[in-house]
Every structure is written in C-alpha cells, then in structure tokens.
Image: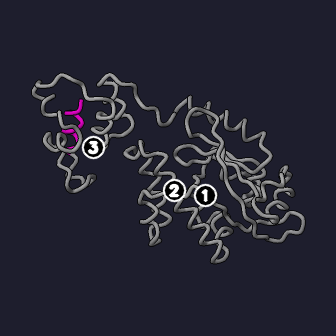
Amino acid sequence: MIEQFRIARQREISLGKYMPWKRFTQQELNDEACATYKNLLVGRSLRIPDRNRILTIADYLELSSDGRNDLLLAAGYLPIQTEISGNALEQAIGQAQHTMNVLPYPAMIVTHTEDIKGYNESFRRLFGFPESHAYDHLMNRIDLHFNPDLPVYLRSTFDRSSFEKWKTHAVQGIRLFKNNHILSRYDDWYQRVLNRFEHYLAEEQWLEDALVTGDIDNGELTQSILTRSESNGEFIPIQYKQVSITTGSLMTPKVQVFLPVDDAARRIFEELGCHVLSTNIK
C-alpha cells in the first residue's frame, strides 16, 4: 500500500502540488521517513514499522485522513478519527442545537469546516442580522468575520484600535484552525477553508504571517464591535469574548458562545435578555 501511494505521488509531481525537492522515490522515502524501508522491500526485515513511523510515512506521502487511516489499518493499527460526517455529524449538530437553545447568551454552532449550522436569537440581534434568518446554513465563519457585505466586518473595524483587535483575532483564529486540524491538512476540505481565507485576504500583507503555523496566544482575546442599543437605537462600541462548548468526544461541532467583557457590553447583553453575571465583566 505504501508503494501504491508513493507511485501515485510520483505521477502527480508534474501538477506542482508538492515541494520542489520531493521526488517520492524509494530511496527518498527511506531517507526521509523510514530508515528500514528498503529492507522491507527486499525482505531483509519482516518487522512492521511502529505506529509513529507509519504516521511519519503518511505525512511524508502527504496523505489525506482517509489515506492515512488506510495505511494504519493495513499495518494493523487503529485509525485516527479526526472528524465526523453523514448521520453522525447530523446527530452531533442536533445535540449542539439543544445545548445552544438553553444558553442565556448569544451563540452559534460551528463545524470542523467552519460552517455555521445555526445561531440563536440573541446572536442575530447582537450582530444585526435580519429577522428572516436569510443566512442560516449558508454562512461560513470566515464569511461572518471577513465578508464586507455582512454586518460583522464593518462593525468590528470601526476605528484603528478595533481594526487592530480584529486583525489579531484573525491571525490567532487562522493559526488555531491550522493547529487544531494539523492531521487533516492534506484533506480537500482543509484546503478549501484556507482558500476561503485567501479569497478575502489575498491583498493583506499580514496573511502570509497568519498562514505560517506559529505560537498561539493562550491569553484571553477580546473583540470590539459596534452594536445597536435596543433601548435608544444608538450604536455603542462594546467588548466581548468567545468561549467554545463541545458536546461530543471531538472538538467539533461546537457551540461558540459570546460573553460580555465591559460595562457597555453588559448593558447590551441585558437588553437582549441575557442573564449576565458581574464576573463576566472582568
């Protein structure tokens, strides 16, 4: 099976998908991923490489999640489940929906592909989406933050300070996405998400830095946004933060919850009917 994948990669070299140095030869695989590979090929070694070595080979061959798991199974090891799909995903979204419906805060449901699979009424009012819920099941979280035709981007970049906060959050978000899904980085859906970032940020000089896997700031990031007060109709700058709630054994789908940080946000959240604790302001 390793040879099947290796030969397939050799045939794809002309497509320009791989690093220039990669030739996917038997010698290169032996040198870069498995020092006993040639011995395996000629029968001088009958010992199956250990699990970590199989993962190193899969990484060298730039296999998708399915390819990596096929290789693990062929070697007699358990596969790695990184994401769910089909009926299992729909059931998990249903569990997340139930959790979101009982939360007293604005919230949305996000899948591993960054698709938003629903949001509650407090979320709609906080971010100024129409009552028709026209964006339900049609919006990706990348669209939510970067699409200038949606209200969030313009309301989050209303002055220099808010723009810098928005940019910092964007960089950290991209890096967190890459770190969380490192085992899926050769999957088609992963590349589609990165292409979506590039669609909105192609002209931004800082995008290249964001796409480089770097350290994640474990400190709590706050964001700023202009939101309309329902008591007087005025737009007020507020600060909020996000926390994630998972309802299953995997990181996604997750419920992304929005919490107030400053006094102005606390008042806005109370207008939305949220039960705000004083500790949320700190």
Residue at the image position 68 percent from the left and 53 percent from the top: 134
Give me the C-alpha separation between circle 1 and circle 3: 34 Å
Q: On the image, numbered disc 1 is attached to which residue?
A: 219
**Where are the magenta residues, as a range?**
1-11
Q: Earlier in the sequence, mark 1 or mark 3?
A: 3
Q: Nearer the viewer, residue 71 or 133?
A: 71
Q: Measuring 9% from the left and 27% from the top, which residue is drawn there?
A: 42
User: Quadrant location of the N terminus?
Assistant: top left
Q: Is residue 5 magenta?
A: yes
Q: Are marks 1 and 2 in contact (CB under 8 Å)?
A: no
Please identify the quarter of the rendering in which residue 56 is found. Answer: top left
- Quadrant assignment, res 53: top left
Residue 53 belongs to the span the image colors magenta: no
The chief SS type of the magenta part is helix
Which residue is under mark 2?
216
| Vertical side of 85 occupied by 45: above or below | above
Q: Is residue 36 left or right of residue 218?
A: left
The disc labelled 1 sits on which kind of residue?
A: Gly
Choose the circle earlier in sequence order: 2 or 3.
3
Of marks 2 and 3, the one in the foreground: 2
